[in-house]
Amino acid sequence: MLNNSFEELERKYNKLQREKIFKILLIIGTVFSLGFFVFNFFKKEKLQIQEKSEVKQTKEKSPNLELKPKIDLKELKPIIEEKEKINATKITPPTKEEEMPKEIFKRKTKKIQKKKLTDITIEDEKTLKQNYLLYGDYKSAISLSKLFLEKKNYQKAIKWAIRATKYAPKNDEPWIIYAKAKASMGQKELAIKALKTYLKKHKSKRAQELLIKYQRGKK
Amino acid sequence: MNQFDKAQQIFNDIINTQEYFDSFSAERVKKKLFKALNSKDIFLIFLIGNPGVGKTFMLSYVKEKIKNRKNIIFFKDPFFTKEEFFKKLIYKRIGEEENYLGYGELKERAIQLYQNIDNAIFIDEAQILTDEQLELIRILSDTKIFKFVLSMHYKDRKKILKSDYFKNRAHIDINLEPLQTSEIGRYIQSKLLNSSLGDISSMFEDRDFEIIAKFTKGNFRMLKRYMSTLFELLSYAYDNNLKEYKKINKKLLTMAAIDLGLINVK
């Protein structure tokens, strides 16, 4: 004698099958999410390692300055983040070329006068930093260096001067700014040492004059 | 009555010693039991196995086989007093009840009657023997006049053997194992074929036996109940012309297991 009716057994069997399917789906879902989580985790780890190695590489690539001040990684982090943000918002130019105008118009705008360094505002500082982050160019770096020297923010002037040397190692300008900043901070000996290092390999009248000036001043 | 009803009947849980199934384990146990029963040194034999594995059947079968050569006294359960025990021994020997004798006299009479008689006392479900009964068995086995075969569940064996009654007594353990998957198939087929149900027998495939083995775990009693339920379901499907169940399939096999509570579904 059956304990359940035939129909009841059929119902229970169907329920059992549904439960089995649900369990299988649950297992698949769990495995999939776990895999996704692990994949993302390792991806993130890889990115972090890459970032670290990039920072390390840029450090290694910088000129062999004996008096090179250390670049603080903590200071670099917000810059990198800012760079990433700008990259994200950067709009790619249209690939299609614009048509040439049929008539030639005279330029109506006035010539933009070059701003003096003293006229550079905070906005300019931001623009220069953005430019540097976008293009990583010498011009932005040296301009920032000059700006901070004018503002008597010698630490930052030194920092940007060092960065500028990466792009134009032969140029005397960053070395001169570096020396001026060090001298202004009362570290004339370091300024002289830096100028001498530069002049060992390169020729520069301005650097030479500054070196003589500091050497005399020291005496 | 359709063919499936007939098939259901042959799997009813009734002990019929004519239907001995020669599984590997049963053959081994049978051989060991006969050897131990003929031994002059062993007076305690433990037949061990899980519930439903076929211990009672084995005792009944062995009793049937040797009843002409030995005096077998079979207690199908251990619910007896010491007096009842000896009364049964005496009755078995002389065919008369000794109702007027006291315990001591009964004991002496039984020992006297069995002194030179080849005998064996089978006690089924021995795991529920009381301490008093165990003590009695120990004393009687020590006389080397009575030979005991105690059948019990596997998990209780250690407990009884560790007790002071049998700690240092010579004994033999005989384990009865469940059926193997291949044996389950052979058992079902032989039962059906012996009852001229070849058509039903051919409905089973090897994978069906594997599923049945998984559900019943080779337990004889459970296997019989399971087969009985399965044929009841098939009979119902046949009578109601349910086409889905004309052949044995996984659904039907699972439904039988659900009905017996082998799978818990609410």
Image: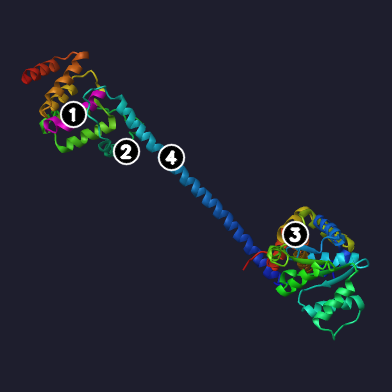
Identify the element where label 4 is drawn: helix
Residue type of the residue flagged with mark 2:
Glu
Q: Locate residue B237, reporting x and y percent.
A: 77, 67
Residue receiving disc 3: B218
Task: Decide which of tag 4 and tag 1 comes sooner along the chain.
Answer: 4
Q: Nearer the viewer, mark 4 or mark 3?
A: 3
Q: Locate residue A181, reporting x and y percent.
A: 14, 27
Residue receiving disc 1: A158
Dot 4 and dot 1 within a common chain = yes
Q: Nearer the viewer, residue A80 or B172?
A: B172
Taking the image as drawn, is residue B130 in sight?
A: no
Q: Nearer the viewer, residue B5 or B59?
A: B59
Position of residue A196 relative to residue A161, above or below, is above
- For the point 37% across and 38% down, which residue is it? A48
Residue A148 shown in magenta: yes
Give the magenta range: A147-166
Dot 4 and dot 3 within a common chain = no
Q: Nearer the viewer, residue B90 or A6?
A: B90
Q: Locate residue B2, reporting x and y percent.
A: 84, 69
Task: Decide which of tag 2 and tag 1 comes sooner along the chain.
Answer: 2
Dot 3 and dot 1 within a common chain = no
Chain letter for mark 4: A
Residue receiving disc 2: A84
The quadrant where residue A100 appears? top left
Chain letter for mark 3: B
Chain letter for mark 1: A
Q: Nearer the viewer, mark 2 or mark 3?
A: 3
Q: Nearer the viewer, mark 2 or mark 1?
A: 1
Mark 4 and mark 3: Cα distance apart in space: 52 Å
CB under 8 Å between discs 2 and 1:
no
